[in-house]
Image (spheres, rainbow, N blue to C red):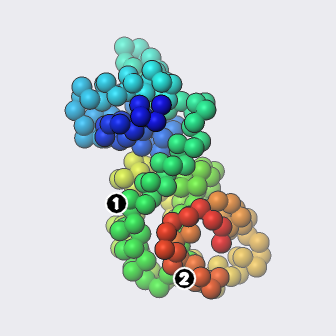
Amino acid sequence: MLVQLLSSRTRVKLLKLFFLNQDRAYFVREMVRKTGEHLNSVRREVKNLHRIGFVREINQGKKKFYQVNTEHGLFPEFKALLFKAQVLEQRKTLRELQRIGRIKYLCLTGFFSGLEHTVTDVLIVGSINRLKLKKLLRRFQLDFDRPLNYTVMTPSEFRYRNDLTDRFLYTILENPKIVIVDKLHQRQTLPRLTGESA
C-alpha cells in the first residue's frame, strides 16, 4: 500500500490536499488548480486513491466530488505524518517568523495539532511587527489551503493568564502542539520541530 500511496508526485500533492482539509470535498478541476498538475494525472490518481479506500466519492447532481475517508484505518497516522512533513517544509517561513520581533514563545496549535475547536492556530508571546507577521502567515495559509488564526500576547499578559489558569491558554499548553521557540521555560529555539509539550 505504501508504494501505491507514495509513488507519484501528483498523488502526494493530492494526499496533502485531502488530509490537510479533511472537511472539504473537491471536484477534479478544483484539484487540478490546487495542485498545479495535469487533468489526466489528477483523474488517474484520484481513481487510485478511491480504489484503495483513502478517498470517498460524493455525487451531487451531475458533479462528482472527492473527500478524504476519515474512517480509513491509516487515517490518523497519515494525517500526522503529512502535517509534520508540511510544517518541516515551512522551516524557512518559521525562521523568518522568529526574526520579525523579540519572540519569547512560539507554538503551532489548533489546526496543526488536530485541535479543530481551538480558536487559534499560532500562539506568539513577545513583541513583533504585525504587518510582517500577517505577510508571513499569508504564505503559510496558501500552503495549507486554509485561513490560519493567530494570537499575540506580551510576556506579562502570558504570565497573568497562566497564573489564572486561563481556559484559552490552558487548552493550548496542556494539549499536543509544535513548539518552535520557548524562552519562557529556559529553552532555546528547538533544532527540529516536535509535538512535545512545553
- Give the vertical position of 5 relative to 175 (above or below): above
In the rendered image, residue 5, in percent from the top left (x then y), is placed at 42, 34
In the rendered image, residue 119, in percent from the top left (x then y), is placed at 59, 57
Q: Name the residue rendered at 56%, 69% in the picture.
A: 179
Relative side of 49 to 177, left or right: left
* Residue 79 visible (yes or no): yes
Question: Which numbered disc covers residue 139?
Answer: 1
Q: Quadrant of the C terminus?
A: bottom right
- Give the vertical position of 3 relative to 83 (above or below): above
Going by the numbered disc 1, the residue's amino acid type is Arg
> How many neighbours does mark 1 have within 10 angstroms: few (below 14), some (14-19), or many (20 or more)?
few
Whether pointer 2 and pointer 1 mark residues with C-beta atoms closer than 8 Å, the reply is no
Q: Quadrant of residue 7?
A: top left
Front-lying residue, 119 or 196 = 196
- Give the vertical position of 57 relative to 170 (above or below): above
Relative side of 52 to 72, left or right: left
Q: Name the residue rendered at 59%, 42% in the picture.
A: 76
Alpha carbon distance from label 2 to label 1 = 25 Å
* Residue 123 visible (yes or no): no
Relative side of 182 to 27, left or right: right
Front-lying residue, 13 or 5 = 5
Going by the numbered disc 2, the residue's amino acid type is Gln
> How many neighbours does mark 2 have within 10 angstroms: few (below 14), some (14-19), or many (20 or more)?
few
Q: Which residue is mark 2?
A: 188
